[in-house]
Image (spheres, rainbow, N blue to C red):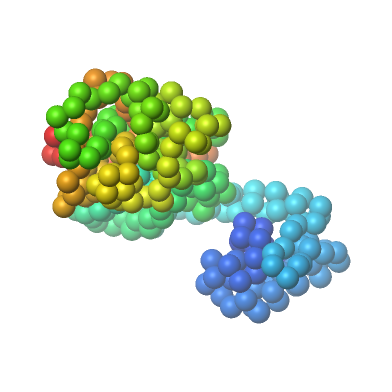
Amino acid sequence: MKNFTLKHFRYFDALARERHFGRAAEACAISQPALSVQIKELEAMFGAPLVERSARQISLTTLGEEFLVRARRVLTEVEEIADLSRKPDGPITGRLRMGVIPTVAPYLLPEIIKRLSVILPDLELRPRESVTQALLDDLMQTRLDFIIAALPVSEPSLREFALFDEDFVLIRSGRDAHKEVPAPDKLREMNLLLLEEGHCFRDQALSVCAIRQSDPSLMMEGSSLATLVQMVDAGMGVTLIPEMAIPLETKGTRVAISRFEEGTAKRTIGMIWRRTNPLEKQLMSLAAAIRQIGQAQRERHRI
C-alpha cells in the first residue's frame, strides 16, 4: 500500500494552484526545498512524474491532473469531517476561514470582526480578501469556509444567503454638484472610471450603465475604489462606488456624491458556503448575525 499522507495532498494541491514551487512553498509555510522533496516523494510512489518542470513555472501531467481531482476530493472530505467534531447545536466556535471581496472588505469587515468578537467570543475568524472568482475557487476546494460577495453566483453546489441590498452612488467633480444627476445608461457618454477586469463590481457597473464588456474604449480603469475617487477628484471623469464606501473613500476629497433614482443602480451582498458543509445550521445563524451588522452599518452611513 502506498504511504500517501494528507501532507502530500495539501502540498500537491498548493503546487497545482500556484504553478510555481516558490509560491506554493510560501503558501504552505515551508521552504521550497522541503516542498520539492515532498513532491518528488509523491512521484516516486506513483513511479511516474506528476508535474512537468520548466524554469518559470510548472504544469501538470495527465496523471497529475487525474491525481489532483482525487486529492482535492479527499481534502474536502477531511475538512468536513473536522467540522463534524464541532458541537452541532451550539454557537459556532473555533477557526473559521472567510473570504471577502475588495469592494466590501475595507468597509464592512472591521465592523464584522468587532461585533462578532462580542457575541461569539470563541469564534476565530481568519479573513482573506480577493476577487470573487478566486474566492469561489478556494471555497469549492475547502480552503475557505464561507465568503461574502455580490449575488448571485449561481453555482448549484453552493448555498447563497442574501445579507442586504446596497445602492451605487455617482461620484463627480465637486464643480458638477449642481448639475442634474444623469440616468445610469448616460454614463457611457462620459469619461467613466471603473475597476480593472476581475472585479465583480466592474461587471455590475457595466451592466447598470448598459455598456458591453467588449467595448473597453468607453472607460478608464483603476486598481481600487480609492484610486477611482482620487482620479475623479483630479478631474479625470466620473465613477460609481458602493454606498458603504462613501465615508472612507470620499473623506478629504472635493467630489460630489449623487444618488440615482431609487432601485436603478444597486447590488445584493450575500454570504455563500458549500451545501455539503456540516455546519450548515450554524452558518445560517452566523449569516443572520452578519446581516444585522451590515444593515445597521448601512443605516448609520446612509446619506
Query: Quadrant where the N terminus lies?
Result: bottom right
Foreground of the two, 98 or 183? 183
**Left/right of residue 264 with respect to residue 206 in the rendered view:** left
Rendered image quadrant of residue 204: top left
Residue lying at the far right of the rendered structure:
47
Q: In this view, does 101 lie to the left or right of 163?
A: right
Residue 102, percent from left and from top: 38, 48
Q: Position of residue 291 (x, y in %)?
A: 27, 36
Question: Position of 297 compared to 190: left or right?
Answer: left
| Viewer-closest of 149 and 252 | 252
- Residue 67: image quadrant is bottom right
> Measured along the vertical axis of the image, is residue 125 above or below residue 104?
below
Give the residue drawn at x 81%, y 52%.
62
Please name the residue shown 27% across and 49% down the image.
234
Q: Can I make out residue 1 in this image?
A: no
Q: Can residue 220 be seen in this view?
A: yes
At 62% from the left and 76% from the top, the residue drawn is 32
Tell me where residue 195 appears, x and y as whole percent.
41, 43
Q: Is residue 206 left or right of residue 120?
A: right
Measured as percent of width and height from the top left, residue 178 is found at 14, 29
